[in-house]
Amino acid sequence: MANASTSTPQSDREIVITRLFNAPRDLVWQAWTDPAHIAQWWGPEGFTTRVEEMDLRPGGQSRYVMVGPDGTEYPVQGVFREVVPPERIVTTDEFGEGYEEITDIDLPQGMVITILFEDLGDQTKLALHISHPTAEERRKHEEMGVVAGWNSTLDCLAEHLTGVTA
């Protein structure tokens, strides 16, 4: 299991969520980057995820489709800017084509996510830094429930890690 998440604003444009997992860093990295693992835990509780593309290298793309409990599909995509196994990933994060058709929310744009994996022996501290181009984009993202969504997603990762061996 994982310790509780914390969410702190680091600036008017950034959201930071941290979580301590009771799993070694290499395993947390593998669960975060291997499509076979991702499909088993990614997304808030009750969601499933299809990994359509995962090219884990600078310039490579990721494309996931999260499927809600009611069957609604939520496409998300990104381009990896930096990949330093098993320490750091920097990627863009955009709502995929068609997302605006399933929601009436004014979607935030231009997000960059930095994921840091800190080795604490048998534990891993994961820090998720979500940067927005403006404070207004950050506000829109918070209003659509980004912190609760990520906390639920990280709960799913913690549960997945309890059943996986390195």
Image (cartoon, grey):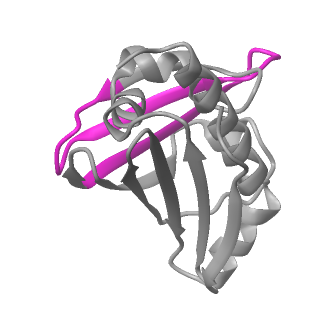
- Please name whichever residue, 158 or 134, is drawn nearer the observer in this view of the structure: 158
Can you name the residue that lies furthest to the front here? 121
- Please name whichever residue, 2 or 130, is drawn nearer the observer in this view of the structure: 2
Point out the stretch of residues depicted in magenta.
Answer: 53-81
Q: Where is residue 141 in the image (x, y as percent from the top left)?
A: 70, 62
Residue 16 appears left or right of 89 = right
**Tally of marks:** 0
Residue 116 appears left or right of 134 = left
Magenta portion: prevailing SS class:
strand
Q: Position of residue 85 (x, y in %)?
A: 21, 45
What residue is shown at x 66% (from left), y 28% (from top)?
Answer: 156
What residue is shown at x 47% (from left), y 33% (from top)?
Answer: 23
Asked whether 78 falls inside the magenta stretch, the response is yes
Q: Position of residue 40 (x, y in %)?
A: 54, 15
What residue is shown at x 75% (from left), y 27% (from top)?
Answer: 45
Task: Examine the rendered structure and indicate whether residue 52 appears above or below residue 27.
Answer: above
Residue 67 appears left or right of 161 = right
Task: Examine the rendered structure and indicate whether residue 82 appears above or below residue 21.
Answer: below
- Please name whichever residue, 127 or 56, is drawn nearer the observer in this view of the structure: 127
Task: Examine the rendered structure and indicate whether residue 42 appears above or below residue 2.
Answer: above
Asked whether 36 falls inside the magenta stretch, the response is no
Task: Examine the rendered structure and indicate whether residue 56 appears above or below residue 135.
Answer: above
- Please name whichever residue, 136 or 20, is drawn nearer the observer in this view of the structure: 20
Q: In which quarter of the image is the C terminus?
A: top left
Q: Where is residue 6 in the image (x, y as percent from the top left)?
A: 70, 62
What residue is shown at x 51% (from left), y 39% (from top)?
Answer: 76
Q: Quadrant of the N terminus?
A: top right
